[in-house]
Image (cartoon, rainbow, N blue to C red):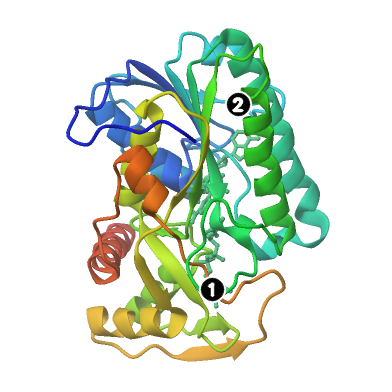
């Protein structure tokens, strides 16, 4: 990568954006932030508010907002050109997430959603000459790492089928961008374990907070000493917005939250925030789980003029409030 954004300059306005995965955790927050800055958002997802509860909760802040155009469609089969036409940027966040379920029969869904659908999105975006695609990659592409923070230039050792599909996804996007006839630039963001309100229910921080809040047991895979560079959702969204307007460039950028913590420390925080003890049940380490992720964030600072702002205690506090509000609404 060669270009940089200039700190202090206002970000360019995004007139029209496509967000794939808009009924998902990160996509719905991103769509909301884009609407707030006056962007027309074409939100594409194969789930809608009628098809499952988490999609309904994610879409609730978006449906009916001026400028939000929901499209319920599967990227594997739908006509993409009408959806992508005239977009300034495509945020390609749709995908099959989750490290541990990617072994076994679900692998074909990972291949379909993370690789085959991405090929269709890139094919259409480059044909239409969409100026910028921002694609969701993953810290999991680093796999087993040596001590220290992971740099975008490090050798990659993906340790799960999911991680292999995310690496294929980002490299596929970069391969399109490198074609001599391609006028689309691509930024692949390697998000590090994102958390915050509406986090996916399979993820650890949600489960730890819910266990503390509700008094139900928490399952820990392994000894609880594995560490993650947890990234608050608002930080992930601001990095993603910055990637849309960073000066013409193609490449990968780490998006890491800056607070590296173990699962044991997350449990402790959940206990402090709720004033309750979590009952923990230990299970064997899951295949593909890595002991540590840690982001080197210097490229994000130089290329996106971005650094994380929300620390783990504040972020988990906001997520806990959300869980409490949602539970109260459901009880009512
Ligand atoms: P999510 O499951 O909440 O959202 C993904 C959305 O994509 C879902 O709503 C799903 O219906 C949609 N989708 C999947 N395949 C589709 C298809 N073929 N056509 C249309 N829609 C489709 O997941 P998330 O946590 O918001 O993650 C978003 C993206 O970020 C994913 O690509 C994931 O791999 C990546 N990522 C997430 C994290 C994290 O910590 N959450 C970290 C690194 C990377
Ligand atoms: C998360 C997302 O789920 C992936 O989609 C994403 O690509 C990845 O972050 C990333 O950073 O790239 P992961 O780090 O495994 O993956 O995040 P969690 O699902 O929150 O798990 C964190 C740790 O908690 C793992 O070691 C996991 O085994 C453990 N865990 C999770 C438990 O011990 N118990 C649970 O109930 C859930």
- Comparing marks 1 and 2, which lies closer to the viewer? 1
Label 2 sits on a secondary structure element that is loop
Residue that mark 1 sits on: 292
Quarter that holds the C terminus: bottom left
The structure residue drawn at horizontal position 71% and vertical position 38%, both measured from the top left corner, is 115
Label 1 sits on a secondary structure element that is loop
Neighbor class of circle 1 (other Cα within 10 Å; few <14, some 14-19, many 20+) is many
Q: Could one spot residue 80 in this view of the protein?
A: no
Task: From this view, report whether residue 258 is shown above or below residue 26.
Answer: below
User: At which x and y percent is residue 3?
Assistant: 41, 30
User: At which x and y percent is residue 86?
Assistant: 46, 8
Q: CA distance from mark 1 to mark 2?
A: 36 Å
The structure residue drawn at horizontal position 30% and vertical position 45%, both measured from the top left corner, is 306
Contact, mark 1 vs mark 2 (Cβ under 8 Å): no
The structure residue drawn at horizontal position 75% and vertical position 43%, both measured from the top left corner, is 111
Specify whether 6 is left or right of 79.
Answer: left
Residue that mark 2 sits on: 73
> In this view of the protein, which residue sits in the foreground, 327 or 262?
262
Q: Could one spot residue 142 in this view of the protein?
A: yes
The structure residue drawn at horizontal position 69% and vertical position 59%, both measured from the top left corner, is 158
Mark 2 within 8 Å of ligand 1, using the beta carbon = yes
User: At which x and y percent is residue 57?
Assistant: 39, 46
- Image quadrant of ligand 2 equals bottom right
> In this view of the protein, which residue sits in the foreground, 135 or 35?
135
> In this view of the protein, which residue sits in the foreground, 330 or 144?
144
Mark 1 within 8 Å of ligand 2, using the beta carbon = no
Task: From this view, report whether residue 152 is shown above or below residue 283.
Answer: above
């Amino acid at each position: 990568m060669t270009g940089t954004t200039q700190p202090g300059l206002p970000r360019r306005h995004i007139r029209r954006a496509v967000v794939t995965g808009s009924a998902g955790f990160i996509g719905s927050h991103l769509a909301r932030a884009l609407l707030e800055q006056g962007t027309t958002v074409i939100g594409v997802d194969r789930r809608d508010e009628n098809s499952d509860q988490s999609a309904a909760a994610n879409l609730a802040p978006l449906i009916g907002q001026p400028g939000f155009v929901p499209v319920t469609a599967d990227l594997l089969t739908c006509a993409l050109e009408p959806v992508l036409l005239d977009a300034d940027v495509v945020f390609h966040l749709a995908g099959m997430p989750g490290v541990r379920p990617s072994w076994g029969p679900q692998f074909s869904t990972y291949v379909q959603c993370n690789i085959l659908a991405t090929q269709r999105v890139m094919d259409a975006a480059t044909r239409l000459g969409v100026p910028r695609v921002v694609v969701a990659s993953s810290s999991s592409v680093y796999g087993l790492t040596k001590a220290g923070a992971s740099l975008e230039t490090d050798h990659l050792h993906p340790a799960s089928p999911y991680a292999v599909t995310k690496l294929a996804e980002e490299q596929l996007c970069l391969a399109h961008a490198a074609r001599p006839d391609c006028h689309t630039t691509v930024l692949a963001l390697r998000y590090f374990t994102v958390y915050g309100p509406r986090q996916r229910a399979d993820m650890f921080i949600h489960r730890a907070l819910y266990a503390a809040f509700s008094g139900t047991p928490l399952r820990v895979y392994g000894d609880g000493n594995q560490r993650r560079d947890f990234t608050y959702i608002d930080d992930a969204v601001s990095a993603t917005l910055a990637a849309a307007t960073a000066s013409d460039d193609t490449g990968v950028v780490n998006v890491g939250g800056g607070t590296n913590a173990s699962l044991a420390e997350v449990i402790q925080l959940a206990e402090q925030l709720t004033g309750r003890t979590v009952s923990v049940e230990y299970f064997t380490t899951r295949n593909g789980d890595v002991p540590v992720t840690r982001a080197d964030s210097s490229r994000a600072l130089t290329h996106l003029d971005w650094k994380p702002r929300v620390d783990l205690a504040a972020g988990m506090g906001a997520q806990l409030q959300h869980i409490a509000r949602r539970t109260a609404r459901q009880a009512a």
